[in-house]
Image: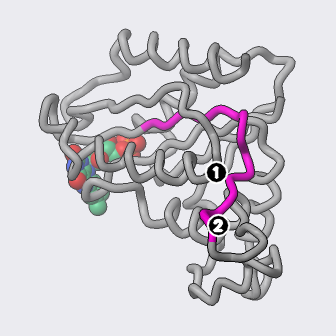
Amino acid sequence: MKILFLNGSPRKNSYTVAIMKCIEKAIDLKHTVEWIHAYDLNIKPCRSCLKCRPDRICVLSKDDGHDVWHKIRSADAVVIGSPTYFGNMSGPLKTLIDRNLTAFEKMGSSGLEKPIPLHKGKKAAVVTACNSPFPISQLINQGEGTLQAVETVVKAGGFSVVGSIILDGAGFRKGIPLEIQEQAKVIGVNIQS
Ligand SMILES: Cc1cc2nc3c(=O)[nH]c(=O)nc-3n(C[C@H](O)[C@H](O)[C@H](O)COP(=O)(O)O)c2cc1C
């Protein structure tokens, strides 16, 4: 299996990435794991021309968004992590996702029906870290909002979500709590099966 880790945090040593790494640790070495760090890429924002729907390629001049398209399209599973910024995913991660609309779904023949998900039968997991403490973190405008926003994307692609994690109160923590490490391990085991 090819398992794609999409990181939307600019801080590679911080909470979101640390939890994603706990998931990665539980993945058998026979699988291929690839990381994409949204903040390392040069991706122009989607211009909403929607030419990618019929053309299956973005009309913008070549940038890293085109390469990411192939990686998402060929992934057998995805783990998407983002810090919670104003109850949502980070801007660069959203830009990357918007530019890759057709890597997740395609239009039906008439163009009027619901888009067809391209990753049916595949698995996904979603991770976020936020400063708000439990139970505030569960509100839609905090960590829960980020989970829902990312889950909307993966579900549009047809992925089934095998697990999602909110690390709350991040600003007050010294590391990843054991119960979150355990949850991440279970997700790692489940995503590869
Ligand atoms: C621009 C910005 C917006 C933020 N918005 C929220 C928020 O809405 N709710 C929250 O609980 N924390 C918020 N935070 C705090 C981050 O979610 C927190 O620092 C988290 O640990 C970031 O993830 P990381 O450690 O993986 O980088 C925000 C931080 C930044 C920089």
From what the image shows, is residue 31 above or below residue 153? above
Q: Is residue 116 magenta?
A: yes
Q: Is residue 139 magenta?
A: no
Q: Which residue is drawn at 55% across and 60% down?
A: 39
Report x, y in % for residue 156: 57, 53
| Within-10-Å neighbours for mark 2: few <14, some 14–19, many 20+ | many
Residue lying farthest to the right in this orientation:
30
What residue is shown with label 2?
101
**Residue 157 circle label:** 1
Q: Is mark 2 on a helix, strand or loop?
A: helix
Report x, y in % for residue 80: 55, 43
Residues drawn in magenta: 113-127
Label 1 is placed on what type of residue? Gly
Asked whether, in this view, residue 46 is left or right of residue 4, the answer is: left
**In which quadrant will I find the C terminus?**
top right
From what the image shows, is residue 168 above or below residue 181? below
Label 2 is placed on what type of residue? Leu
Asked whether, in this view, residue 171 is left or right of residue 65, the answer is: left
